[in-house]
């Protein structure tokens, strides 16, 4: 629907796990509000629930401000309250040598999805932005109840904005960790929204 305050778009859809809809409001001021509501079709055990946005991979700089547990963190800590992270470390670092400590800090270790710093989940965000080298991009404003995580996927940069976030399932943690800390399942018929 169209109004003097902007445009409202409803997108209905279905996944294997759930069906429902996205409600987008595009205001005349350039701000887009996204709401979603889905009902699970099967029992699920989610790691994250939210929305994923994709941009071209040239959007490779993440900045954020969040409400962390602590008031201060080391400047290169992936959990710091605010910062800037590039998808890949600068090419000025020398190549690593087998079985030797890499010449870059741990937060700049990377894989094809980006550095650890770029890919880290930022919890309790107030603001997060993905930008390109010219400073254009998207910004997310939140009340501290959401998380963001960015990653490179081929020719795209993804940003997950999640309303529910569960810790990752590292193989080092064993089955006990999975059953104690990751035990909640959502039965079929559960409404998920954000």
Image: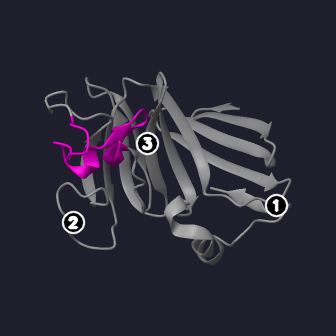
Q: CA distance from mark 2 to mark 3?
A: 20 Å
Q: How many marks?
A: 3
Extent of the magenta region: 96-118
Residue marked by disc 3 = 150
Q: Is residue 68 left or right of residue 46?
A: left
Q: Residue at x 28, y 61 (%)?
A: 81
The disc, 2 or 3, on the residue closer to the chain's N-terminal end is: 2
User: From the image, which quarter does the C terminus lie in?
Assistant: bottom right
Q: CA distance from mark 3 to mark 1?
A: 27 Å
Residue marked by disc 2 = 73
- Along the viewing direction, whichever of 22 and 192 lies nearer the viewer: 192
Q: Looking at the rendering, which quadrant does residue 151 occupy?
A: top left
Mark 3 secondary-structure assignment: strand
Residue 112 x/y as whole percent: 42, 32
Q: Is residue 137 in view?
A: yes
Q: Residue at x 33, y 68 (%)?
A: 68
Question: In the drawing, what numbered circle is on residue 43?
Answer: 1
Q: Is residue 114 left or right of residue 47?
A: left
Residue 183 x/y as whole percent: 68, 73
Q: CA distance from mark 1 to mark 2?
A: 38 Å
């Amino acid at each position: 629907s169209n109004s003097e305050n902007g445009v409202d778009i409803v997108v209905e859809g279905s996944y294997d796990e759930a069906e429902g809809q996205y409600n987008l409001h595009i205001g005349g001021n350039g701000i887009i509000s996204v709401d979603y509501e889905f009902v699970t079709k099967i029992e699920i055990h989610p790691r994250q629930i939210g929305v994923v946005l994709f941009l071209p991979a040239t959007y490779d700089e993440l900045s954020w401000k969040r409400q962390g547990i602590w008031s201060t963190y080391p400047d290169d800590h992936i959990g710091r309250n605010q910062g800037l992270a590039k998808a890949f470390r600068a090419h000025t670092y020398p190549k690593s040598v087998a079985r030797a400590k890499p010449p870059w800090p741990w937060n700049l270790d990377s894989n094809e999805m980006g550095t650890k710093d770029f890919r880290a989940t930022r919890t309790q965000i107030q603001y997060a932005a993905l930008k390109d080298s010219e400073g254009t991009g998207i910004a997310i404003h939140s009340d501290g109840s959401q998380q963001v995580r960015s990653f490179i996927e081929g020719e795209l940069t993804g940003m997950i904005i999640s309303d529910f976030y569960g810790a990752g399932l590292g193989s080092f943690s064993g089955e006990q960790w999975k059953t104690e800390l990751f035990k909640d399942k959502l039965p079929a018929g559960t409404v998920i929204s954000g």
